[in-house]
Image (tube, helix red, strand yellow):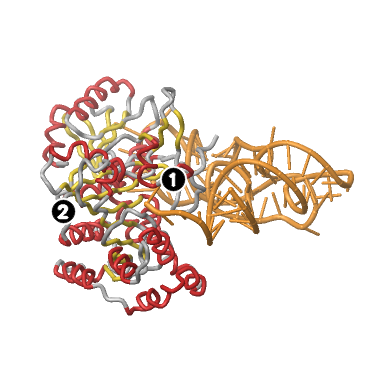
RNA sequence: GUGGCCAUAGCUCAAUGGUAGAGCCCCAGAUUGUGGUUCUGGCUGUUGCGGGUUCGAGUCCCGUUGGCCACCCCA
């Protein structure tokens, strides 16, 4: 039996890797004053169709529950965010700086960097429509990657502005109902032959290509870059108006983060969505918002492909999961005393393991090594003293058992 | 959802249509109280699954499931 397609088993190393990612994400987010929240994994299907239309159902893990409710595993967190914010916004001072680590699901054919299940970091700043909020959120996205040791040689944030394009469409007297279709064409233009794009754009082609070829200037984005430059982060960003993003709900600045090599899918993406909360709450609450999401799959791939970054994270992981102490029971008749001390050591907060059954001393030392223990305590003929060995140096010293905790407490803090 | 490539031991991979193998991992030993190295031995396969062609199929053909890649879509 294998896991379902697009779903992953997390063996201990994978789990450790995942939680190392989460730990760093949390740390950086908290450094920006963001607080963690969460919502249900299962939501009403309507929550998603309301935002994206009925077509979205084809991409959902959805079903009818035993109470005849149409439900879906969450494909993303933003609709839940809008729902929660609309219901509870009065309980919080603005702006809200919220992050979450949801596991999200989508019914799609899997490929590299795109599974049917993934974890993503969502960061949203709600209730502030200023450019300063955009800057804060983009700086956070950059620092999340810098937090793993990535530099401007590893990734780039491509900045764009939906408003720039909607202004252009308005100037060209394009009716509103065609905007989303044309924005999609522009979004796709990078990956398609120029003639095809030109054909789809029709009379707009000249104006659009002029912008894509570098003829477009966005005062707003240039100001944004200056603000990032003031924080010393300008080297991580690049204005690129060809970024539009597929989602219809973005209303202003949008951005995507890519690896410099361009080998992977987007590492993160987001933007400003000032109307979505009002739309999903039927106008009950209207708050501007800006946010982004960063998935664990693509970021994990990038980390694994960047040896120095991976080594650093692996080092953190191995330190976090390692034992402190392994008890070697050289004489089985000393097991009762060893078990009493085992409990005392664990009560004192040490990570301690020992063999469950009689085993050769050599095997026990191998188990100590494999568990990453720094110290072994050997229980045998020396009792009432135990032989304490520092594995790294192979130094051994006899310690009276009643002095053990004190001795450990003095010599090794955690 | 569409198309192309792939599928052999737990892992990485060999094997002209002619007796399924290696390395790693794991387990056990190297005269019984000391680990990373070394040496010896052991374990594991319906060659993804189901059909077909053939004296004979891991190898060729069809189907199916799964993986990879490109589309679609991208939260």
Image coordinates of residue A384 in percent, x first then y, are 20, 25
Which residue is drawn at the image coordinates 39% and 29% (left, top)? Answer: A359
Which residue is drawn at the image coordinates 25% and 61% (left, top)? Answer: A142
Asked whether the beta carbons under mark 1 and mark 2 sit within 8 Å of each other, the answer is: no
The quadrant the N terminus of chain A occupies is top right
The image quadrant that residue A69 belongs to is top left
Which of the numbered marks, if any, corresponds to residue A34? none
Which residue is drawn at the image coordinates 41% and 46% (left, top)? Answer: A53
Q: Give the left or right position of residue A14, taking residue A25 as reference.
A: right
Q: Which residue is mark 1?
A: A56
Compare residues A15 and A83 and report the one nearer the observer: A83
Per the model, the C-alpha gap separating discs 1 and 2 is 29 Å
Compare residues A33 and A256 and report the one nearer the observer: A256
Q: Going from the N terminus, do you reach mark 1 or mark 2 first?
A: 1
The quadrant the C terminus of chain A occupies is top left
Chain of residue at mark 1:
A
Q: Is residue A156 visible?
A: no
Q: Give the left or right position of residue A39, taking residue B67 as reference.
A: left
Seen in the picture, residue A244 relative to A321 is either above or below; the reply is below
Image coordinates of residue A333 in percent, x first then y, are 31, 20
Q: Which residue is mark 2?
A: A128
Dot 2 falls on a residue whose secondary structure is: loop
Seen in the picture, residue A365 relative to A222 is either above or below; the reply is above
Q: Are the residues flagged by discs 1 and 2 from a single subunit?
A: yes
The image quadrant that residue A41 belongs to is top left
Dot 1 falls on a residue whose secondary structure is: helix
Image coordinates of residue A371 in percent, x first then y, are 34, 39
Image coordinates of residue A175 in percent, x first then y, are 37, 63
Q: Give the left or right position of residue B26, taking residue A132 as reference.
A: right
């Amino acid at each position: 039996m294998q896991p379902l397609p697009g779903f992953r088993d997390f063996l201990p190393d994978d789990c450790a890797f995942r939680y190392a990612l989460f730990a760093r994400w949390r740390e950086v987010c908290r450094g920006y004053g963001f607080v963690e929240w969460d919502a249900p994994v299962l939501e009403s299907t309507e929550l998603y169709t309301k935002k994206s239309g009925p077509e979205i159902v084809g991409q959902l893990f959805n079903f009818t529950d035993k109470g005849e409710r149409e439900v879906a595993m969450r494909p993303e967190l933003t609709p839940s965010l809008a729902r929660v914010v609309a219901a509870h916004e009065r309980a919080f001072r603005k702006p809200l700086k919220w992050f979450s680590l949801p596991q999200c699901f989508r019914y799609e054919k899997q490929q590299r960097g795109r599974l049917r299940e993934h974890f993503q970091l969502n960061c949203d700043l709600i209730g502030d429509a200023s450019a300063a909020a955009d800057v804060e959120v983009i700086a956070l996205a950059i620092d999340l990657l810098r937090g793993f040791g990535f530099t401007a040689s590893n990734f780039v944030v491509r900045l764009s502005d939906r408003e720039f394009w909607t202004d252009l469409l308005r100037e060209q007297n394009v009716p509103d109902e065609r905007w989303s279709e044309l924005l999609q064409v522009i979004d796709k233009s990078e990956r398609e032959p120029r003639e095809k794009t030109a054909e789809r754009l029709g009379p707009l082609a000249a104006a659009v290509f002029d912008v894509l070829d570098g003829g477009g200037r966005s005062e707003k984005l240039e100001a944004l870059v200056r603000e990032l430059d003031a924080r010393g982060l300008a080297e991580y960003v690049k204005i690129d108006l060809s970024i539009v993003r597929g989602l219809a709900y973005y209303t202003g600045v949008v951005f995507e983060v890519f690896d410099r090599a361009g080998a992977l899918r987007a590492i993160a993406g987001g933007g400003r969505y000032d109307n979505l909360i009002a739309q999903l709450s039927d106008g009950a609450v209207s708050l501007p918002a800006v946010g982004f999401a960063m998935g664990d799959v693509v970021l994990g791939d990038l980390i694994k492909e960047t040896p120095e970054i991976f080594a650093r994270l692996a080092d953190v992981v191995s330190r976090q999961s390692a034992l402190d102490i392994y008890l070697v029971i050289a004489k089985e008749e000393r097991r009762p005393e060893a078990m009493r001390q085992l409990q005392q050591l664990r009560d004192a907060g040490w990570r301690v393991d020992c063999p469950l059954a009689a085993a050769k001393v050599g095997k026990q030392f191998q188990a100590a090594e494999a568990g990453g223990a720094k110290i072994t305590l050997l229980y045998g003929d020396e009792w009432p003293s135990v032989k304490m060995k520092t594995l790294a140096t192979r130094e051994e010293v006899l310690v009276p058992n009643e002095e053990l905790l004190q001795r450990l407490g003095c010599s090794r803090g955690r």
